[in-house]
Amino acid sequence: MYTYLEDSNDIGQVIEAIFDSLRLWRAEHYDVAMWVQSWTEIYEQLPDTIGNDYFSFDLREAALRAYVSQFDWYLHPEEGLVEEPEDDEGNELEEVDPFEYGIEGMFYGWDIPQEYYQEAMAEAFEAYAAGVHPYTDGIKDEIDIIVKRYEESDEPQDDMLAALVALAIYHTSGNIIEDYGDSVGLDFSLAYDIRENGFVETFGEDEVAEFMFG
């Protein structure tokens, strides 16, 4: 999906890396699979609760719900929730919904396998989106517009103009290229030079002419 920048002297590759940085930011904030991957990579083992300044989600409870849901549960008059459909005397027990009985208390201390935490991350994304997207939707709109303009461009000079616009896009915690460029091999010092000085001063007239006219 993303091309790692191999030649920082190649204007075309640098421009593609600029836009890959924007695409990566967009994916990690709006694509559930990418969001789950980026958050999972932070931890060796997913914690019971995840969040930041914009959201908080009880991952253990969601994982517990997913885990408990795979079993049938029956109400024993003395033992509470059990997995066996009959008591010791062979009497049939009533099948019940365990979530009506406060599963955190009933299953407190259970060791929930990590795959259920992973499954619960999709639900966590919904909480994340509710808390974060109101602050980032405008940024995504900017990215959508300039990425579309770049992807539909047939002229090298239009690619360069689009890249200069892209370099000026900020998210809630800083410049997107500075924060995400490393992931695609783009050094921010190069991106900063292009943004402040333009392509000609950064790469030289001959290189720009070669890129534009071949």
Image: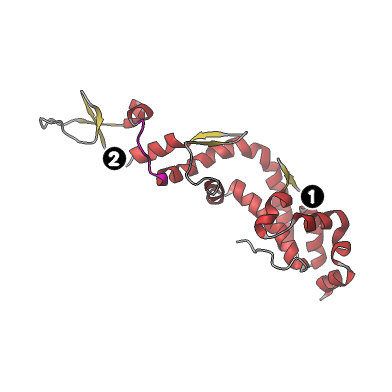
Q: Which image quadrant: the C terminus?
A: bottom right
Label 1 CA crowd tier, 10 Å (few <14, some 14–19, many 20+): few
Identify residue for label 1.
168
The residue at the far top in this view is 78
Q: Nearer the viewer, residue 136 or 113?
A: 113
The image's colour scheme reads: secondary structure
Identify residue for label 2.
71
Q: Are marks 1 and 2 in contact (CB under 8 Å)?
A: no
Left or right: 100 in relation to 58: left
The residue at the far front in this view is 44
Per the picture, the main secondary structure of the magenta-coloured stretch is loop
Q: Which residues are magenta?
A: 108-114
The residue at the far left in this view is 89
Asked which quadrant contains residue 72, the reply is top left
Q: Give coordinates of residue 103: x percent, y percent.
A: 36, 30
Q: Give coordinates of residue 87: x percent, y percent.
A: 15, 31
Q: Which amino acid type corresponds to the residue marked 2 in the rendered image?
A: Phe
* 72 in magenta: no
Asked which quadrant contains residue 1, the reply is bottom right
* Residue shown at 73% from the left, 52% from the top: 177
Judged from the image, the secondary structure of the residue bearing numbered disc 1 is: loop
Whichever of callouts 1 and 2 sits on the residue coming sooner in the sequence is 2
* 110 in magenta: yes
Check the image and report above or below for 7 versus 29: below
* Residue shown at 35% from the left, 35% from the top: 110
